[in-house]
Amino acid sequence: MEKKLITILVPAYNEQEVLNMLYDRLKKLMDENEKYDFEILLVNDGSKDDTLKIMQELRQKDKRVCYLNLSRNFGKETAMIAGLDYCKGDAVVIIDADLQDPPELIPEMLKYWEEGYDDVYAKRKSRKGETWLKKFTSTMYYKVLQAFTKIQIQKDTGDFRLLDRRCVEALKSIRESQRYTKGLFSWIGYNKKEILYDRDPRAAGKTKWNYKKLVDLSIDGITSFTTSPLRWSAILGIIVSIVGFIYMIYIIIKTIISGVEVPGYASTMVVILFLGGIQLVFLGVIGEYLGRAFYETKGRPLYFVDRYNEEKETNLKVKK
Ligand code: UDP
Ligand code: MG
């Protein structure tokens, strides 16, 4: 009987310190699980250090290692879809390069996959080596996101998960450029299974996340799954108009009865500033959606490939 192929997909950006460690852990795992064939697909997301060189050395040592070199840094979300496009496995496990996600969990994921689950995701019980501020913002973020969107987004779950081939095909068919993969995992549906784990601190190297990226990603998360901020602004607009209308009637009647009243600077300023502020905020909200539409209508490819293993290549089918 032919063995099933499992792809381990690793997006990596400036990870020269950890790649060898990661390979050692994965090698141990692959050697212990002879029931399956394995492929390690390393996606080099335009690293500026020796990451690519290390990937090439690993490939020379072990042909189960494949690597995909993108033409520049596109960000983790894009690196992941590039990896999904190129993976060959019957199931794919997405894992961070920095060993924050223990590869030792993979056999358990495989067990559930064999039981028929399509998406086995690992949920963090604890997060070592992360500041309380990061934990706090992350909790708040999930709350806000959940309030806005109707789809269930799994709390405390990263991209560490096993996906069946049909989930991979589903994700591949979604070609939006501002990807919020965490939401897409939920959006595609299929049988999901949660397993719990302790998130380790980074093995070495530095985190690539900063608060700007986090804010960007959270806005992408909201704007790519719901238009409810637009609805809310319309509702608030209606409420403010009604209040304004009532106040207008009141002022007109008051002026008719007791004549023109000159003072009123404070109240005028308050109204102008308040309404001006609200208008700017909602212009921003509209702009956010318009911006997304702008990017999507361009229909650019999501990424460009520099090489896949030994082959120099491009992901575009060149038409002559
Ligand atoms: N990563 C990537 N492209 C980027 C930034 C990050 O492929 O532009 C990869 C990175 O190499 C790692 C994973 O995404 O494998 C998670 O990144 P990181 O550990 O910096 O994030 P954190 O775990 O701190 O949230
Ligand atoms: Mg990390």
Image: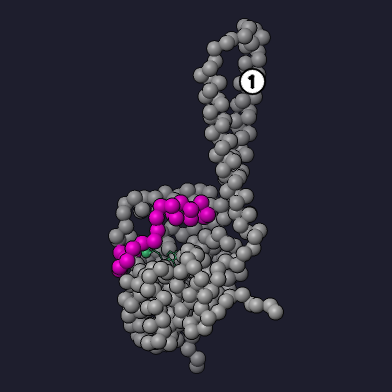
Q: Amino acid at mark 1?
A: Met
Residue at x-position 44% and y-position 76%: 42
Residue 132: image location, x then y, percent: 31, 52
Residue at x-position 41% and y-position 52%: 211
Residue 261 is at least partly visible in this image: yes
Side (left or right) of 55 relative to 283:
left
Residue position for label 1 = 248
Magenta-span inclusion, residue 45: no
Residue farthest bottom in this picture: 1
Is residue 118 or residue 129 the one in the foreground?
129
- Does 150 appear above or below 123? above
Residue at x-position 46% and y-position 69%: 45
Side (left or right) of 32 relative to 88:
left
Taking the image in four quarters, ligand 1 sits in the one at: bottom left
Residue 97: image location, x then y, percent: 38, 71
Is residue 240 or residue 313 the one in the foreground?
313
Residue at x-position 46% and y-position 79%: 67
Q: How is the image coloured?
A: one colour
Which region of the structure is painted magenta? 198-221
